[in-house]
C-alpha cells in the first residue's frame, strides 16, 4: 500500500513510518522540521517532501503519482504553550484542510492525531461522549480537527478516524525537550543520579501510553471499517510516584522523589481514557502496561 505520513520526522510520526516500512508499505513523508529531526528516520527508504503542510496543495504536488491508499496525519504544532491563536489555528487547522481536499478528490482514508487536550479539565475517565472543553488554543485546534474529520467522513466513501492521544512516551521523543513526556524527563534526572522532582505529593495521575501501542492504534485504524473519533490511551491512570517506582526498577536505582509546590493555579490532577469506544471501533487493546513500557523504553535508551 502507499501511505502519506505528515509529521513523519516527529516522535510519533517516525515510529509510524518505520513500522509501515517494516510491514513493507511504500511511505512518503511530509515534514517541515519545525520540531522533528532527521535522526528519527534512520533507515527510512521512502520519499520526503519538505514543507509546511498548511501551505501545500497536495493534489498538485502528487498529481503525477498513483493516489495514496491512506493518509496518517501527525503534523502539528506540539508546543502546547504557544498562545498565538492565529499561528496555532493556521498551521494545525489549515494543515488538516489540505489533507481533506486531497481525500475528497481521491476518496482517501484519513487517520489523524487528535488529543486528550480537547477534554480540558473534564472529569476522569474522559470519554468521547463528553463535551469538548479545551483550555488552550492547542486543544481548541484539535477540537476543530475533530469537527472537520466528522464532516469529511460524511463526504467521502472511506473511513476518517481521529485518535485522541493521551500522554504518549517512548523512543524518538528526545527532540521535544521540555515537551517530551514526564517519563523521559524523570528518566534523565534519575539517569544523572538526581532525585526525581515532582509536584507535592506525586499522587497526580495521567494515562501514560507507550508509543508502540499508539502505532498499533494507527495501524488498526488503517483497516477499520467505520469512521469515528476515539481515545488512544491505556484506560489506566498511573501516578508520578508509580512512574518513579517503575523507573527505579528499570534503572536498578533507589532514588526517592523530591517534592515541590505546584506553581499552577489550575492543574489537571487526573486523566484516564475510557477506551471502550476504541476497542469497539478498532479492536484496540493496549499491549503494554506502563511498567512494561518503561522497561522497554529504558532498555532502548540504555542501549541506543
Ligand atoms: N506526544 C503526545 O503525548 C501527544 C498527545 C496528544 C496528541 N499528540 C499529537 O500527536 C501528533 C504527533 O506529536 P508528536 O508528539 O510526535 O510531536 P512532534 O513535535 O515530535 O511531531 C510533530 C511533527 O510535525 C512536524 N510539523 C509541525 N507542523 C508542521 C507543518 N505545518 N507542516 C509540516 N510538518 C509539520 C514537526 O516538524 C514534527 O516532526 C501531533 O499531532 C500531536 O498534536 C501527541
Image (cartoon, rainbow, N blue to C red):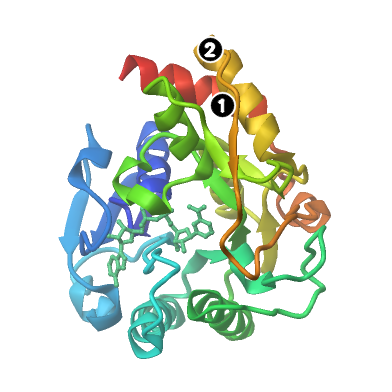
What residue lies at 28% left-to-right and 63% top-to-bottom? 66
Q: How far apart are marks 1 and 2 (CA)?
A: 14 Å
Q: In which quarter of the image is the C terminus?
A: top left
* Helix, strand or loop under label 1: helix
User: Can you give x and y, in whole percent of width and height, for residue 270 in the image?
Assistant: 75, 55
The crowding category of the residue bearing disc 2, from other C-alpha atoms within 10 Å (few below 14, some 14 to 19, many at least 20), is few
Vertical order, 294 against 41 (above or below): above
Corner quadrant of residue 64: bottom left
Say the numbered circle drawn on residue 280.
none
Image-based side of 170 in relation to 206, left or right: left
Say the numbered circle drawn on residue 294.
1
Q: Which residue lies furthest to the bottom in this view?
A: 86
Residue ID for mark 2: 253
Cβ of disc 1 within 8 Å of ligand 1?
A: no
Corner quadrant of residue 50: bottom left
What residue lies at 27% left-to-right and 76% top-to-bottom? 58
User: Can you give x and y, in whole percent of width and height, for residue 87 in the image?
Assistant: 33, 84
Q: Earlier in the sequence, mark 1 or mark 2?
A: 2
Q: Which of 123 and 219 is in front in this view?
A: 123
User: Can you give x and y, in whole percent of width and height, for residue 218 in the image?
Assistant: 55, 50
How many numbered badges does the structure rendering display?
A: 2
* Helix, strand or loop under label 2: loop
Amino acid at each position: 500500500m502507499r501511505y502519506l505520513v505528515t509529521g513523519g520526522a516527529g516522535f510519533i510520526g517516525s515510529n509510524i513510518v518505520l513500522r509501515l516500512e517494516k510491514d513493507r508499505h511504500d511511505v512518503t513523508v511530509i515534514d517541515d522540521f519545525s520540531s522533528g529531526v532527521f535522526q528519527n528516520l534512520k533507515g527510512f527508504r521512502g520519499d520526503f517532501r519538505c514543507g509546511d503542510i498548511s501551505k501545500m496543495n497536495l493534489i498538485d504536488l502528487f498529481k503525477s503519482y498513483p493516489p495514496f491508499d491512506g493518509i496518517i496525519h501527525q503534523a502539528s504544532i506540539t508546543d502546547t504553550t504557544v498562545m498565538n491563536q492565529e499561528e496555532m489555528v493556521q498551521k494545525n487547522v489549515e494543515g488538516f484542510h489540505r489533507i481533506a481536499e486531497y481525500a475528497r478528490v481521491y476518496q482517501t482514508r484519513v487517520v489523524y492525531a487528535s488529543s486528550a487536550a480537547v477534554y480540558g479539565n473534564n472529569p476522569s475517565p474522559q470519554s468521547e461522549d463528553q463535551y469538548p472543553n479545551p483550555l488552550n488554543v492547542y486543544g481548541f485546534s484539535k477540537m476543530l480537527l475533530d469537527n472537520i474529520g466528522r464532516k469529511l467522513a460524511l463526504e467521502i466513501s472511506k473511513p476518517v478516524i481521529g485518535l485522541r492521544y493521551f500522554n504518549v512516551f517512548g523512543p524518538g521523543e528526545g527532540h521535544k525537550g521540555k515537551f517530551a513526556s514526564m517519563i523521559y524527563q524523570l528518566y534523565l534526572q534519575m539517569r544523572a543520579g538526581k532525585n526525581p522532582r515532582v509536584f507535592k505529593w506525586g499522587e497526580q495521575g495521567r494515562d501514560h501510553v507507550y508509543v508502540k501501542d499508539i502505532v498499533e492504534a494507527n495501524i488498526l485504524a488503517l483497516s477499520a471499517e467505520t469512521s469515528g473519533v476515539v481515545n488512544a490511551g491505556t484506560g489506566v491512570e498511573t501516578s508520578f510516584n508509580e512512574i518513579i517506582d517503575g523507573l527505579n526498577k528499570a534503572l536498578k536505582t533507589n532514588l526517592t522523589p523530591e517534592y515541590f509546590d505546584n506553581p499552577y493555579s489550575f492543574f489537571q490532577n487526573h486523566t484516564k481514557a475510557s477506551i471502550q469506544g476504541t476497542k469497539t471501533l478498532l479492536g484496540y487493546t493496549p499491549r503494554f502496561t506502563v511498567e512494561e513500557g518503561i522497561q522497554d523504553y529504558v532498555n532502548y535508551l540504555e542501549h541506543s
